[in-house]
Amino acid sequence: MTKKLIIFLVEGITEKISFGVIFSEIFNNRNIEFHIINGDITSDYSISYQNIKRKIKQQIKTFLGKEHYKKSDIIQVNHIVDTDGTFIANNKIKKHSKDNTIYKKDKILTKKIDYIKKRNEKKSRILKKLYKSNTIFGLPYKIYYLSCNLEHVLHNEANINQNEKKKDMAENFEFEYSNKEKDFLKFIRSKNIAVKQNYNKSWKYITKENNSLKRNSNLHLIFEGYQTW
């Protein structure tokens, strides 16, 4: 009997490198596949509150079109996103002269204040819609966050801009936790990272105050009760 499939939708290669091996080891009774969207679909200029679910459906169909799976093989779609401080108040977005956007614990520093405000407004609305969506394309769907981004959660560094450095960090993380499922689960469930609430409450928490800038994640919830998928 063919193992059923869990798809992880991720922004880029660093998520796949960081999590690919260890997730396969933990979900050893399932097929695990990562589909790289190549960017943040929740803040893409062509994406809106109205079409986001259709765009995710297209991503799933794109995955199926290039792989050897059928839709009926899929038992779960898990979507992993960065929060990028998207839920903070507009008065926490401050002007500075540097080209790079800087994420602090209580504010965002940026050269493009209006752009970040518009991005946050759109992205926050989309994320709220997605976490309340139980299915997309007729498939079970859940969305999980890394705050304020992957490197922040895994390495406690929120402002890494060099892609090569990000890739090196991802490879180091993969090496550190490969064949160490218990160590990884201890890490991702640790009080320094995990939002210790249920799925809906973990999302309500991240929308409050400056929480979407802090080092938080609800990724640990993926590993609670997954055997029932």
Image (cartoon, rainbow, N blue to C red):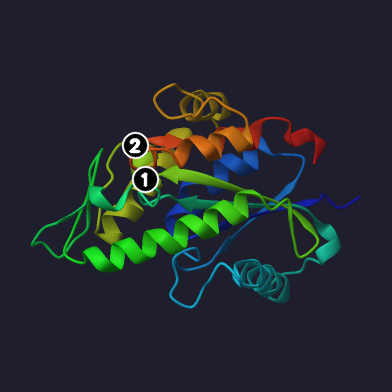
Q: Which quadrant holds residue 57?
A: bottom right
Q: Secondary structure at mark 1?
A: loop
Assign the C terminus to one quadrant of the image: top right
- Residue type at the position of mark 1: Cys
Q: Residue at x 8, y 62 (%)?
A: 97
Measured in 3D between alpha carbons, the distance from the residue under mark 1 to the one under mark 2, in whole angstroms, is 6 Å
Instruction: For residue 12, say whether it is visible.
Output: no
**Mark 1, other Cα within 10 Å: few <14 / some 14–19 / many ≥20:** many
Q: Nearer the viewer, residue 124 or 13?
A: 124
Q: Residue at x 35, y 55 (%)?
A: 167
Q: Look at the numbered discs 1 and 2 and tell me whether their residues touch, using CB distance below 8 Å.
A: yes
Q: Residue at x 56, y 67 (%)?
A: 49
Q: Secondary structure at mark 2?
A: loop
Number of callouts:
2
In the picture as drawn, the residue positioned furthest to the right comes out as 1
Left or right: where 117 falls relative to 16:
left
Residue at image mark 2: 214
Left or right: where 17 falls relative to 139:
left
**Mark 2, other Cα within 10 Å: few <14 / some 14–19 / many ≥20:** many
Q: Position of residue 126 (x, y in %)?
A: 53, 60
Q: Position of residue 145 (x, y in %)?
A: 50, 45
- Residue type at the position of mark 2: Lys
Q: Position of residue 15 (x, y in %)?
A: 47, 52
Left or right: where 91 falls relative to 220:
left
Left or right: where 29 falls relative to 178:
right
Q: Residue at x 48, y 78 (%)?
A: 46
Residue 148 has which mark?
Answer: 1
Instruction: For residue 48, say whether it is visible.
Output: yes
Residue 25 has which mark?
Answer: none
Could you tell which of marks 1 and 2 lies nearer the N-terminus?
A: 1
